[in-house]
Amino acid sequence: MFLLHDFFKFIKLKNRINLFSFFLAFIVSVIFVVIFNLTSNPIAWLVSLLIFYFVFVSLLEKKISGKYFKNKKDIIGYIFYREYFGESKFDIHKNFSKEEIEEFIKDLDCKEFILKNKIQSEFSFRKNKDYNILKFEGPHLKQYTREIPWEIISWKYSFQDDDSIEEYLEIEYVNEQGIVIKEDIITERISQKTSFHLFLLFVIHDLKYGQRLSLQRGYYMKKRSSFKIDAFG
């Protein structure tokens, strides 16, 4: 099971690996330049530094990241890493057969996932804890007083860690009167423990009860440190 706690640990470790790899590459590149008598060639020193840095990063990450990616058949983990890192190796349809996808969704227990990841399932206004905005109740998403079946919900979510944390969430559905409802949910006003909780809640409920939009979308755009997903269109 994908655990957000392990992801945070991996990111911290990844940052340490980058720093350690730079210092190690610096030392090795200096030795390399001295041995081959390239001290008068700054370009050769810079090239060797970059080469050693990327080699060390790759080797160390491969060596250490195994414990965080040990469950190779966790679709939720693949969805999360695919959108966070934007890497093709986390493509769902290249790594899972239709049968494996169906089996995973069949066995997916939303309540257990929420419990093990220590995620809240109800979200209220920051300034008024008694005024609920969202509640995740099995096959229905409760927004304020409305209960919306997941099978009719399309949604957008984006995360950007820039000068400040900014999360964007939008849902769209057709109500019983045939009217298209499209609403922004201002996440800055929502009381939540940490980022990504809303995203994971939308993913697991979308997979279990909804249109499984999470399996097909791969829209990713890098803007400094960003996390962006587009489910519409």
Image: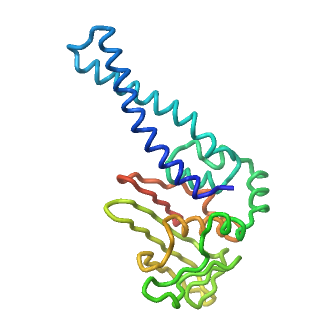
The picture quadrant where one finds residue 27 is: top left
The answer to whether residue 35 is left or right of residue 176 is left
Residue 141: in sight, yes or no?
A: yes
Quarter of the image where the N terminus is located: bottom right
- Residue drawn where x is 22% and y is 15% of the image: 41
Compared to 31, does 176 lie above or below? Answer: below
In-front residue for pair 112/95: 112
Q: Could you say where residue 117 lies in the image, as x and y percent from the top left?
A: 63, 64
Compared to 18, does 110 lie above or below? Answer: below
Q: Could you say where residue 106 lies in the image, as x and y percent from the top left?
A: 79, 62
The answer to whether residue 26 is left or right of residue 114 is left
Q: Could you say where residue 58 lies in the image, as x and y percent from the top left?
A: 50, 32
- Residue drawn where x is 53% and y is 91% of the image: 130
The answer to whether residue 231 is left or right of residue 109 is left
The answer to whether residue 65 is left or right of residue 105 is left
- Residue drawn where x is 55% and y is 88% of the image: 144
